[in-house]
Image (cartoon, helix red, strand yellow):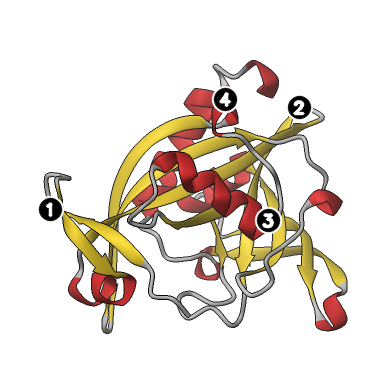
Amino acid sequence: METEMLKVFDDDRNQIGVAAREEVHRLGHWHEVFHCWFVSREAGVEYLYLQHRCAMKKDYPNLLDITAAGHLLAHETVYDGVREIKEEIGIDVSFDELVPLGIIEYQQTKEHFIDKELANVFLYVSTHHFDEFILQQEEVSGLVKVVLNDFEELWTEALEKVNIQGFEIKQEYKRMMIDRYVGRDEFVPHDRSYYISIIRLIRENLSKTPSAK
């Protein structure tokens, strides 16, 4: 597999070079990623869409995460981030359809892994049905939705569990429907402040988005 090369930055967001992805995470360099959160409105209820990370993923396998996300390679700009949406969940989206939520800095550290990300975060108001999503199965094993209000209460700790509905790809590539309750331990452990910031930004921008009304 070809080594992925990433741009690296100092604490003031100035680019200071390029490094291999493994080195970036080993040494804890700031680097750019792309995050896109899908939302929908159904019968007046707002839903947030989450991917279920494949069991084969090296980092955070079998956990719920951002709808579509990935690293921006050294030769890419933020405009190229839409490729992650197509690759991971099979939906064609143009950059002009995305609502920018800003750049959020956050970091996670575990043994031999320091993840310091400059996350270019976007919102996409979706009208797609579950059967339109085609998953990159070596990366994503399922897709679910959660009521946005419930998701917020999960991260403000007003709720301990939330209902998710969607599908997972099981043996022989069969889709199995999901309808169950999950707690915070089943999500990628982004800082709680990250989730709360994302929810606030989504709400602020949904109120300005005509297609969400």
Residue 50 pos. (x, y %) = 62, 55
Residue type at mark 3: give it.
Answer: Ile
Q: Quadrant of residue 206?
A: top right
Task: Please tell me whether mark 2 sits on a helix, a strand or a loop.
Answer: loop
* Alpha carbon distance from label 1 to label 2: 44 Å
Residue type at mark 1: give it.
Answer: Asp
Label 2 crowd bin: few (<14), some (14–19), many (20+), radius 10 Å: few
Q: Which residue is mark 1?
A: 10
Q: Which residue is mark 2?
A: 44
Q: Is residue 99 above or below residue 69?
A: above
Q: Which residue is mark 3?
A: 89
Residue 45 pos. (x, y %) = 73, 33
Q: Nearer the viewer, mark 3 or mark 2?
A: 3
Q: Is residue 213 above or below residue 202?
A: above
Label pair 2/4, CB-CB below 8 angstroms: no
Mark drawn on residue 206: 4
* Alpha carbon distance from label 3 to label 2: 25 Å
Q: Is residue 128 left or right of residue 199?
A: right
Q: Is residue 211 visible?
A: yes
Mark drawn on residue 113: none
Label 4 crowd bin: few (<14), some (14–19), many (20+), radius 10 Å: many
* Alpha carbon distance from label 3 to label 1: 32 Å
Q: Is residue 87 left or right of residue 132?
A: left
